Amino acid sequence: MKVVIIMGSEKDIPHSEKITKKLDELGVAHESHVASAHKTPLKALKILEDFKGQKKTVFITIAGRSNALSGFCAGNTTLPVIACPPFADKVDMMVNINSTIQMPSNVPVMTVLDPENTAIACYNILNC
């Protein structure tokens, strides 16, 4: 059982740490990577490929603005992908949330805004 966190940039590390703290409390193994769908798509694809065929793995994507990362990941894996986008404040959330929740057909990204709830969702998925 493992959670793989993919962040769009190093600026997302503080947001990721909120998730990993809860994953640690729940006893869920995890690893983190920085890979951008825009700037380093081959790196992001390599991370997804490394887990191809593995069971009991959930990806968490952390990216703001256009959030291509979540859709990129969901479009290139059959494993669950949960987007947990970082927001500076409620206004930032309202401006940017649409890029996270409006995915094309056959690109299933779940979206959970609260970092701790994201960790709990992963725990629940992995323990089904």
Image (tube, helix red, strand yellow):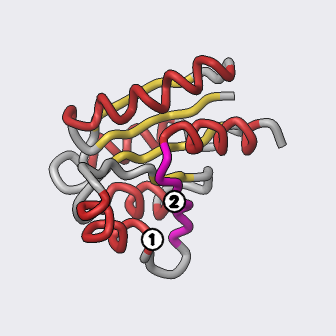
Q: Is residue 38 left or right of residue 19?
A: left
- The image quarter containing residue 126 is top right
Residue at screen point 20% across, 46% down = 40
Q: Residue furthest bottom?
A: 105
The residue that label 1 is drawn on is: 101
The residue that label 2 is drawn on is: 111
Rendering coords of residue 94 (x, y %): 31, 69
Residue at screen point 25% across, 70% down = 95
Q: Are marks 1 and 2 in contact (CB under 8 Å)?
A: yes
Rendering coords of residue 81 (x, y %): 54, 52
Q: Is residue 110 left or right of residue 71?
A: right
Mark 1 and mark 2: Cα distance apart in space: 7 Å
Q: Amino acid at mark 2?
A: Thr
Q: How many marks?
A: 2
Rendering coords of residue 36 (x, y %): 24, 47
Of residues 26 and 66, which is closer to you in this image? 26
Of residues 84 and 59, which is closer to you in this image? 84
In the image, residue 27 above or below residue 111: above
Q: Quadrant of the C terminus?
A: top right
* Residue 108 sits inside the magenta stretch: yes
Q: Which residues are magenta?
A: 107-114
Q: Quadrant of the N terminus?
A: top right
Q: Amino acid at mark 1?
A: Ile
* Residue 29 sits inside the magenta stretch: no
Residue at screen point 33% across, 70% down = 99
